Amino acid sequence: MHIMPQIKPITIYRLAWRNLAQKPFRTTCLIIMTLLFSASLFGGSILTKNLNDGIAGMANRLGADILIVPYGYEKELEVALLRGEPSTFYLKADLAQKIEKIKGITAVSSQLFIASLSAGCCTSKLQLIGFEQSTDFVISPWMKQQLTARLHDNEVVVGSKILADVGDEITFFNHRFRVAAKMDSTGMGFDTSVFMTMDAAYNLMKTADLLSGDVDHIRNYVSSIFIRVDHDYQPKAIVNQIMQKYAVEYNLDFVMTKVMISDIYKWLNSFSVIVYTLAAIFWLLAIVVIFIVYSSTINERKREVGILRILGASRSMLVKMLFIESFIISVIGAIIGIIFATIVLCAFSMLICQSLGLPCINASFSSAITYGLIVFILTLIIAPLASSYSVLSITRTDSYQAYREGE
Amino acid sequence: MNRFLSSAFVILIGLLVILVPTYILPVCPPTEIMANSHDHHITYKFMKCHWTSQAEIGIGTAMVVIGLILLLIKSTLIRLGLNISLVVIAMFVAAVPTILIGVCPSEMMACHIGTLPALLLLSGILFIGILVNIFYLKRLS
């Protein structure tokens, strides 16, 4: 028995799809134009959001208003805070006791920075930070959840990206330490730092022979002094007072955390302007290219439309078919662009943040969905908007004239 | 996929598999070890990501060769067979830095945050592209 192949009925959706499939090169080029916009806008927006959240998180966590470092080392401290890039520098420790007396200062705490050696194969240098447990107000507040008891000299607290778990032993300069706690991810340099008591840090420096010169008085040195200022006082005024009294004697430099954070925000604003300008350029470019492509095929398509009109298709059906065509281009472009940007961001977000040297916190799923929807809608209107002139002008002509014009 | 297009795709991905761990997003450099303090002879210790990059150079080269053969051979069945072999090769591109050899485990290392995701991405792109081509060639044959 001979079975007749089943012929699928012709619908405007199927016709629109077949029209696109008939011209694969043109369709692919138009899809690429729309996906450039969706990928750049979605990827750029999510990256800006990640950086913004990372910087906001850092601003909240950094409890100090002023950081004092030896002259010329303010960049090293910023880099240690932002990226955790290890560095070692020293300042006379007695300054902390002297500045405590200045009116307007509510808390002073010192820290000692030691850059570790790489601990072996597949490990990199780490920032070891000795901190004073009795006066600390920078690290302890966000270690409380993980560390309930007082830290001992043979114990350390490790950042979230350090490959060690609570109870493990970790060796620095041939000294063994027990990991007492592991911190949550902060998105900043502390994720790759190791915290220990000030005594442990001094012992490490002395026995590992890390300091040349005045080794016997090693406890007279710290790397930086963190200062918290009363809300009624301006940090700038406090800095001026310290400068006048101690800048020459101690050779100091200052990092004002608010200024540092606002400088980073300024950079982030310029970055987002570039991202959105690029996305706007891609949006306009996609509209212009699709408009040109559709306009240049008006004559060719008039013949096709004329035949369909003669076969009985109404004008509204043809308008619908041509708009569905452009709609399909936008939908495919939007979906591929968003998926592409998501894959690139998921794969390389850490590399991007590390290259930019700024703290990053991955955007939540809900905010990613929100951004995705906004980008999807903006991409969706590209092709229908760009093709509307051509669609209307093709379908406006009467069927016979349209058929003859297309010849 | 068109013969020229499919072979260009395979050659391009093959070249990227070679260039990513060596130049584009290189693996961690070897660590210097002063073996002898008297004559200052320096020896180098390679991390395991180095051996991953060496293996990927081999896999990438095989892909480039297969890509060139795809360009020269017109027989659909031979091309289909070569494409099936590329599916296995795509899996190797991903397996070498994850299961077979691996990269440095620390999230701070260049190979972990750069080379590894790039190789996984290339493996995924090759896998999808080859599956599309196999589907196309199967229809042709």
Image (cartoon, rainbow, N blue to C red):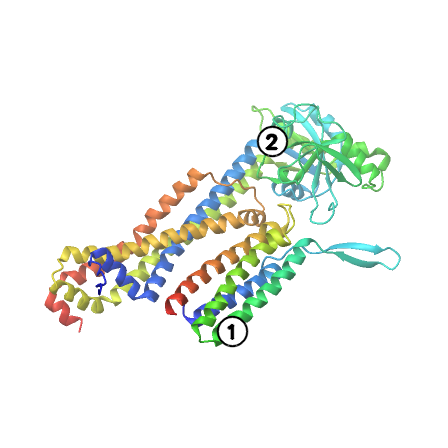
Establish if A38 lies above or below A404: above
Tag 2 and tag 1 share a subunit: no
- Using a 10 Å C-alpha cutoff, classify the residue at mark 2 as few (fewer than 14 neighbours), some (14 to 19) or many (20 or more): some
Q: Which mark is residue A65?
A: 2
- Residue A51: percent from the left, percent from the top? 51, 42
Mark 2 or 1, which is nearer the eye?
1
Q: Quadrant of residue A178?
A: top right
Answer with left or right where residue A137 lies relative to residue A21.
Answer: right
Q: Residue at x 48, y 66 (%)?
A: B83
The residue where tag 1 is placed is: B69
Answer with left or right where residue A23 lies relative to residue A224.
Answer: left
Secondary structure found at label 2: loop
Q: Nearer the viewer, residue B61 or A328?
A: B61
Q: Is residue A379 visible?
A: yes
Judging from the image, mark 2 belongs to the subunit labelled: A
The N terminus of chain A - image quarter: bottom left
- Residue B20: percent from the left, percent from the top? 58, 60
